[in-house]
Image: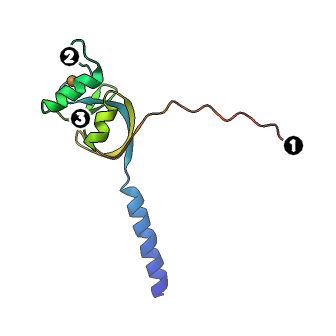
Amino acid sequence: MRLRSLALAATALALTTSLAFAETFTGKVSDTMCGKKHMMAGATDAKCIDECIKGGADYALVIGDKVYTLKGDKAQLAKLAGAKVVVDGDLSGDTVTAKSIKPAQYPRRPHPTRPSF
Ligand SMILES: [Cu+2]
């Protein structure tokens, strides 16, 4: 009986843990100063983001029309400035706290169909 309730408790715990999930967000790395559009004349998006961060802005994740503040590894974000990324993290209000960030990949082609024997 005791073993059984332990197993149940473990299952319940596993369920709760998987419910406290990280969401996946796909968007473009920007900064909170510029948001969707970078205004710095003659500079690339990455350069503009770099300057804005130096000027005190936070990194931002632009998803469609929405601009979220993006908290994460700044060194990594600096490399991905202006790039399309896939972020695993938590959304709270307008802030995405990243657990992992990776460059977005183009959709994979379906596997070529193999002849069946
Ligand atoms: Cu900027």
Query: Residue 97 vs residue 26: left or right?
Result: left
Tell me, yes or no, whether the two marked residues, 3 and 1, touch with CB atoms within 8 Å: no
Q: Distance between the residues labelled 2 and 1?
A: 60 Å
**Residue closest to the far bottom:** 1
Q: Which residue is drawn at 25% across and 16% down?
A: 43
Disc 1 marks a residue whose amino acid type is: Phe
Q: Is mark 2 on a helix, strand or loop?
A: loop
Name the mark on residue 59.
3
Disc 2 marks a residue whose amino acid type is: Met
Q: Residue at x 39, y 62 (%)?
A: 17
Name the mark on residue 40.
2
Question: Upstream in the sequence, badge 2 or badge 3?
Answer: 2
Q: Where is residue 115 in the image (x, y as percent from the top left)?
A: 81, 37
Count of numbered marks:
3
Classify 53 as above or below 48.
below
Tell me, yes or no, whether the two marked residues, 2 and 1, touch with CB atoms within 8 Å: no
Pointer 2 residue Cβ closer than 8 Å to ligand 1: yes
Name the mark on residue 74.
none
Classify 116 as above or below 43.
below
Q: How far apart are marks 2 and 3 (CA)?
A: 16 Å
Q: What element carries label 3?
A: strand
Would you say residue 86 is visible in this rendering? yes
Q: Which residue is drawn at 30% across and 30% down?
A: 81
Disc 3 marks a residue whose amino acid type is: Tyr
Q: Mark 1 points at which residue?
A: 117
Residue 71 falls in which quadrant of the image? top left
Q: Where is residue 82 in the image (x, y as percent from the top left)?
A: 32, 27
Quadrant of the snapshot with the C terminus: top right
Q: Where is residue 48 in the image (x, y as percent from the top left)?
A: 23, 23
